[in-house]
Image: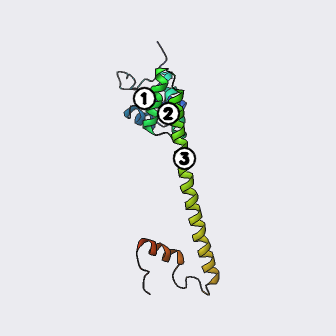
Amino acid sequence: MPQRLQIGVVAHQAGLTVDAIRFYEKSGLLKRPPRTEGGFRLFRLEDVQDLKFIRRAQGLGFSLQEIRELLILRGERVEACEHVRELLEQKLASVRGKIEELKKLERSLEGSLRTCNRKLRQALAPHEGCCPVLEELGRASGQSPPVS
C-alpha cells in the first residue's frame, strides 16, 4: 500500500498552510483524498508534488483557472509545449503592461514629490496655505478647494 500522509505533513512538505490545501481541494485543483474512519484526509506523495506545482505556478503569476488548465495538460501527458508557450506569452504581455502602468505611476509620484519639495522650500512657515498636491487631486476629482 502506498504511503499516505496527513494534511499537516503535506502542508509542511509542500510549503503551504493547511488552509491553503483545503482551499485548493475545494477549488478542484487538488483531488479529494480518501479519509480515515476518523475523517482525516490521507494524501499521496503525488498530491505533495501537485501542491508544489500549484505553488510554483502561482509564483509565476498564473491564476487558479490557468493553473487548473496547466494541471490538466500535465496530467494528460500530451505534447502541450505550444499551448504552455502561448500561456507564458500572454502572462508575459500582462506583466509588461503592469510594469508600464507602474512606471507611469512612478513618474506621477515623482512629479508630485517635486512639487511638494518646491512648495516647502518656498514656504515661509510650514503648512502655510493649502498643499499643492491636495489642490491638484481636488481639481482632478472635480472638487473645489476648501475655503479658509
Residue nearest the observer in this picture, 124 or 112:
112
For this view, does 124 lie left or right of residue 22? right
Amino acid type at image mark 3:
Val
Contact between labelled residues 1 and 2, with CB atoms less than 8 Å apart: yes
Alpha-carbon span between mark 3 and mark 2: 19 Å
Image coordinates for residue 106, horizontal then vertical, percent: 58, 61
Contact between labelled residues 2 and 3, with CB atoms less than 8 Å apart: no
Amino acid type at image mark 1:
Leu
Which disc number belongs to residue 95? 3
Residue nearest the observer in this picture, 125 or 80:
80
Q: Which residue is mark 2?
A: 54
Amino acid type at image mark 2:
Ile
Residue nearest the observer in this picture, 138 or 131:
138
Image coordinates for residue 78, horizontal then vertical, percent: 49, 21
Which residue does the image show at 54% across and 27% down from the upper left?
81
Q: Quadrant of the C terminus?
A: bottom left
Which disc number belongs to residue 30? 1
The answer to whether one can see residue 141 in this image is yes
Which residue does the image show at 40% across and 26% down from the upper left?
31
Dot 2 or dot 1: first in sequence order is 1
